Image (cartoon, rainbow, N blue to C red):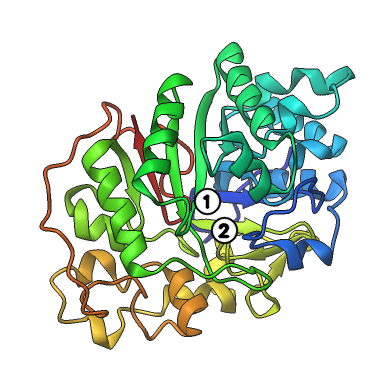
Amino acid sequence: MQNIMQENETIVNWKIGWGFTAACNMACPFCYSRFARQQSSEVPLSIAKHFVEQNAVNIDCINYGTGESTLSPTWFQLISFVREHFPHIRQALTTNGTLAGGKKLSGQNQNWAGNIDEIDVSIDFADAERHNRMRGHPQAYNWALRTLELCEENGITPTIVMVGFAETLTPQNLYALLNLANTYHTFLRLNILRPTRMVSMAAPSIETVFSGITWLLQNAKVVSLSDPLFGALFDPEHQKPEATGISSLRILPDGSITPSTYLITEDWKGNTIYDFELRLSKLADSPTFNRIQQAGIPDECKKCEHAQVCRGGAVDRRVLHFETLSRGDPYCPYLQHFTILEKQPLQYYAGHQTTPTIHDGYLPTLIFSP
């Protein structure tokens, strides 16, 4: 296998989000990748294998998201290949529940559990009716719960991942989701809805976001506030730097590489895994990645006490809300003249400093434990 470093290459342990397939069997109104998936299907297994071989030394972990990877027979072959030849690469799956609830797996696909370290199960509401309606599938909730059970049966680290918007960030829904997480011994991970192309829902207001996050900080244990803004505001001592375009990247179903899960339009596609000479160690030289790495702290943020930690907030939110990196995070309470509660003592998950989940430091996200 080819994984030999070339002279003058830099070792960066990249966390990769890989949208391996465009296939999906649900219809979520907040889907950020619908347009990108309409333009492609998936790359051939030979191309995917070569990319991993060529860059394994620079890959820390891979999370397979976007689409529904379990609908692709090729995906099962890829995770088996990665585990067999590059066991240092941790692998995770984000699934809507099809893994356990779809058609019965056959042949070599049945051995998937030995190849996956973590599974994120998408659940937005802790009741079947609302979750099924949001996902556009009558079995979404039951499949999700069955997948959580499957994690426990196979000794796999599970997480419930929710999309944060007005209806899901209420105390009632958060309380119910935490109870669900407690029942299935999982983490609860929050992704705030982004205003990406083809998303028919509005991003939540600053009032909604801080209300939901404050409730979670008061009622749950912190695993990771892996978001430059909210980490700086509530837990600067343990804040991790923004990973987008620095140590985190996204591969789309057409093979394009972008700096972020959410920055997936043509102007952010600077590389492709179809390029057999592509080296992850040299991505900093790519215009799209260099744009982020050289952005610096926005002028309007430089006098803020959190500037050196927050550095303007989440890159993807700044681009999606303002179409520029010269502005600070749209949820910054100081820039928006929004008053937040005084900092409260936080309860921590026992292993919060040991990176217990692949998503810690992969993208701006907030992770809690019951």
Type of amino acid at the residue the image marks with label 2: Leu
Q: Is residue 37 above or below residue 3?
A: below
* Horizontal and vertical percent position of residue 265: 67, 74
As helix, strand or loop, the secondary structure at mark 1 comes to strand
**Residue at horizontal 79 percent and vertical 18 percent from the top:** 110
Q: Nearer the viewer, residue 86 or 353?
A: 353
Tally the marks: 2
Tell me, yes or no, whether the two marked residues, 2 and 1, touch with CB atoms within 8 Å: yes
Q: Nearer the viewer, residue 68 or 252?
A: 68
Q: Is residue 133 visible?
A: yes
**Residue at horizontal 64 percent and vertical 63 percent from the top:** 32
Q: Could you give the CA–CA distance between mark 2 and mark 1, rounded to whole angstroms?
A: 7 Å
Type of amino acid at the residue the image marks with label 1: Trp
Sequence-first disc among 2 and 1: 1
For the view shown, which residue lies furthest in the front direction? Answer: 129
| Residue highlighted by disc 1 | 14
* Horizontal and vertical percent position of residue 352: 29, 34
**Residue at horizontal 44 percent and vertical 48 percent from the top:** 190
Name the mark nearer the viewer: 2 or 1.
2
Q: Can residue 89 be seen in this view?
A: no
* Horizontal and vertical percent position of residue 177: 44, 35
| Residue highlighted by disc 2 | 249
Q: Which mark is residue 350?
A: none
Q: Is residue 135 left or right of residue 243?
A: right
For the view shown, which residue lies furthest in the top direction? Answer: 153
Q: In this view, does 300 lie above or below 71?
A: below
Crowdedness near tag 2: few (<14), some (14–19) or many (≥20) residues, C-alpha within 10 Å: many
